[in-house]
Image (cartoon, rainbow, N blue to C red):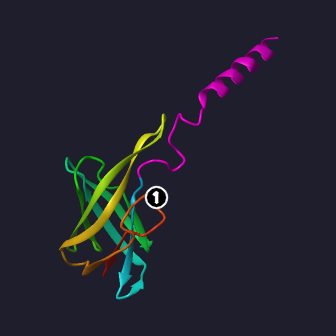
Amino acid sequence: MKKLLSFLILSVIMISCGGDDDICESGEGTPRMKIMFKNADKITTLDSLKVYVDYGARTVDLGWSRNTDSILVPLRVDDSPFTDLYVKRTKKGDSSKVRVSYTTKSIYVSPGCGAKLNYENVSGQLLKVTPVIKLESGQNFIENEDKTNLYLVF
């Protein structure tokens, strides 16, 4: 009898703990910006890349990416119309400064997730060259993380 009672209590706890709206885990949150790399007119894989993102109150180091042709960068979620990125290829090398400008649109997702931001009119401006020599635009809106929004040319 005690085993049956324990099983029933455990079953009730397990069933009541997980609803679809409890956690926003199925990719419904605010999407990140996808950046790919080019060398001349070809997509290229970089052996190393470090990105810092200025979120206004602080700058966050996204760490080193190794042997990659793209990165996903979270943009600001406050009322700022731009996010500044700092990109470097070597530990002691210079950093390029890239300003990503956009407008945001808030969209309700669910009670668990709340609202997410979609970014529209996305454009990049190279404020400091070396190692990045120019930018090329990709898709000018961010609804998910599938399409490339910006190309960094090295």
Q: Quadrant of the N terminus?
A: top right
Q: Position of residue 40 (x, y in %)?
A: 34, 88
Q: Is residue 95 visible?
A: no
Q: Nearer the viewer, residue 28 or 71?
A: 28
Pinpoint residue 82: horizontal percent, then vertical percent. 23, 58
User: Compared to 120, does 16 lie above or below?
Assistant: above
Determine whether 66 is above or below 40 in the image. Answer: above
> How far from the left and from the top, in percent, is residue 69?
43, 74
Residue 20 magenta-highlighted: yes
The part of the image, by quadrant, that contains residue 17 is: top right
**Image quarter of residue 60:** bottom left
Q: Is residue 75 above or below residue 136?
A: above
Quadrant containing the C terminus in the rendered view: bottom left
The count of marks equals: 1
Identify the residue at image location x=42%, y=81%.
44
**Residue at x-position 28% and y-position 56%:** 103
Magenta residue span: 1-30
Q: Is residue 9 magenta?
A: yes
Q: Position of residue 12 (x, y in %)?
A: 68, 21
- Residue 152 can be seen in this image: yes
Q: Amino acid at mark 1?
A: Asn
Of all residues shown, which one is farthest toward the left? Answer: 128
Residue at the location (32% across, 55% down)?
A: 75
At label 1, counting other C-alpha atoms closer than 10 Å, the crowd grade (few under 14, some 14-19, many 20 or more) is some
Work out whether residue 5 or residue 149 is closer to the camera in this orientation and state it: 149
